[in-house]
Amino acid sequence: MAFKPANSIQDLQYFGEFGGVNPSISDSSTYTFISAKTMFDTFEGNTDGCYLYSRHSSPSNLYLGEALAAMEGTETANVYASGMGAITSVLLQNCGAGDHVVSSRTIYGGTYAFLKNFAPRFNVKTSFVDITKLERVEAAITPHTKMIFCECVSNPLLEVADIKGLAQLAKKHNLQLVVDNTFSPLSISPAKLGADVIIHSLTKFINGSSDTVGGVVCGTQDFINQLRSVNDGAAMLLGSTMDSMRSASVLKNLRTLHLRMQQHSKNGLYLAEKFEANGLRTVYPGLASHPAHELFKTMMNTPYGFGGMLTIDVGSIAKANALMELMQHKNLGYLAVSLGFYKTLFSAPGSSTSSEIPEDEQKEIGLSDGLIRFSIGLDADIERTYDMMHECMVELKILD
């Protein structure tokens, strides 16, 4: 039977301390014990259902982690105070001095900066490759390689990774395949395609209200235990623990993710088709013109579509800035970074979310000055939205 991630979330039921339909929030930084022995056993990781200190774990964080593990179809999960907290913990848990990472060349700017500029301090090196070419990925693997890192749908160019193919490569070379699924929650289930570790920035679609930052690592119980180890676990020792209040908030928003992703995808496909018909250079996985359109269809959980992210190229940064400012003035959305909000967000990634990538490398990967990245909102009348966007483009002579 096909994996249905929304059903896995739906089937979870938690009861609050007094029978509430939402689990009670654990608003404590530390926890008491009846006996000293139980405290010792808890510190050693030998007890279930006991809590010592909220940097280690809390009921609220574990509730959210269980729900996200169910969504991704993994054994368990660990939540973090940010997406970068999740990413860096995984990278540092897996890699030490002398190790090597093969990474997609088009990834979130913060991840790129960590791998390119920060990890070398620990003598961890990274080869950045075109992740869509499996032969290039394999050619980059060395005896020191520990992991392959990619994004299901890349930020910001919306390249699509062949998760099954990469998983086979990783298994062949005894590597861990780590996949950032931030752009395609519910649409793609990487663990079911062979990925070992799945990461999300909860800040984006999963939370959906642009009011908090958070991250999650989904994987095997063994790997999550390694991350949580009080002796040498990166999640534990780097201290990027999510606050219980925020965990509870994200858990509530997770309940509507399936509805929101369907609307994000519906609106994204409508606008992408219209923009492409207008002659704009449009990139969206749901378009037949996208190089990985057919690949995406083989991986996707059909009800959730191709996602809410698309790009257009208007030719220059001046035109991009003018268009974004005018669209914001017309209440069509916000000139802002991030994604997954109920309103459309737009930014020029070359000078914002991907600015960590040097200009020469931006050109090499096809990140042009005039590129605008859209996170399409939940607009009820997407036809009206398109008409108004079209008027803005005509006013600025981007379209005739």
Image: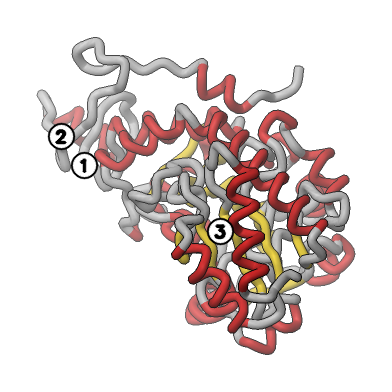
Pick the residue in front: 155 or 346.
Answer: 346
Relative to 306, residue 65 above or below: above
Q: Which residue is mark 1?
A: 53
Percent coordinates x, y for residue 242 in the rendering: 32, 47
**Residue found farthest to the top:** 19
Local packing at callout 1 (Cα closer than 10 Å; few below 14, some 14-19, many 20+) is some
Quarter of the rendering occupied by the C terminus? bottom right
Q: Quadrant of residue 289?
A: bottom right
> Is residue 150 shown to the viewer in this render?
no
Give above or below for 394 relative to 20: below
Residue topped by disc 2: 31
Q: Quadrant of residue 40?
A: top left
The three-letter amino acid code for the residue at tag 2 is Tyr
Give the distance between the C-alpha atoms of the residues marked 1 and 2, in whole angstroms.
Answer: 6 Å
Q: At 17% across and 36% down in the image, what residue appears? A: 27
Q: Position of residue 368 (x, y in %)?
A: 69, 79
Q: Quadrant of residue 5?
A: top right
* Residue 13 relative to residue 239: left or right: right
Mark 3–mark 1 CB contact (< 8 Å): no
> What whole-number distance in Å separates the C-alpha atoms at marks 3 and 1?
25 Å
Rendered image coloring scheme: secondary structure
Q: Residue at x 26, y 39 (%)?
A: 244
The residue wearing badge 3 is 94
